[in-house]
Image: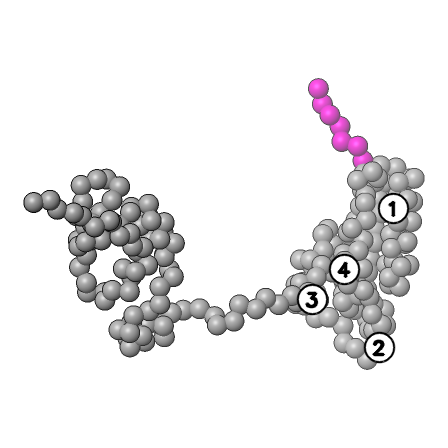
Amino acid sequence: MATTSSPPCYVSVSFLRHLPPSTTVQFFGFSPTQRKLGGLTIARNNLAQDFLGDFGARDPYPEEIASQFGDKVLGNQSTEHKILIPNASVLSLSQLECSPVSSSQAPLSADDATKLLHKVLGWSIVENEAGDLKIRCMWKVRDFGCGVELINRIHKVAEASGHYPSLHLESPTQVRAELSTSSIGGLSMNDFIMAAKIDDIKTSDLSPKKRVWA
């Protein structure tokens, strides 16, 4: 008796994912490229394509929704990115501008001055004869002409900022600068802003040449 076989019916895995989660599926077949599910034949190439594309794409099961699993997920419901303008606390002192200081304003305390001192290079806190605080920096230069040039460069920066240091050419090879705010008898933020601006001045071409010993 002759028998006939119906043509194979191909089904996508997208059909299988609608089965209840407790359903057991067994594959039977005689070739490495095809598997049979009952009377249906499933092509393995379709199986791989649909399966890989299904990662993370399914909807939660009713049991999962009932468990309120989403309430335990950590995260932020808003991923909006905001561009903030940097404030004075994160800007370099050299990027700030000197502002007018009232004579009624109190000078910086020694503690505050010490904290600001960490933001400038080569400066130290000293006291004058009256006990008022000021900051000082010293430079070694190659010769007298370099000392004059350094003073001119510092004066140019100070003129643009409106806050002037006391400059001294102590010897042909040494320059000293001191900063304080005379109107309040001590240090203000302007002194440290000016010190930071002076730090940005190029001085490498004025420094003494290093000796190289053979």
- Identify the residue at horizontal 25%, vertical 44% (top origin): 34
How far across and down, in percent of the image, does residue 142 sit?
Answer: 84, 37
Check if mark 3's residue and mark 1's residue have beta carbons within 8 Å.
no
Camera-near label (3 vs 1) is: 3
Magenta stretch: give its range: 208-214
Camera-near label (4 vs 3) is: 3
Q: Earlier in the sequence, mark 2 or mark 1?
A: 2
Image height check: is 128 above or below 174?
below
Furthest-top residue in view?
214
Q: Tally the marks.
A: 4
Label 4, residues with CA under 10 Å away: few <14, some 14-19, many ≥20: few
Q: Earlier in the sequence, mark 3 or mark 1?
A: 3
Residue beneath disc 4: 95
Per the rendering, the mark at residue 150 is 1
- Identify the residue at horizontal 74%, vertical 60% (top origin): 93
**SS type, badge 3:** loop
Per the rendering, the mark at residue 103 is 2
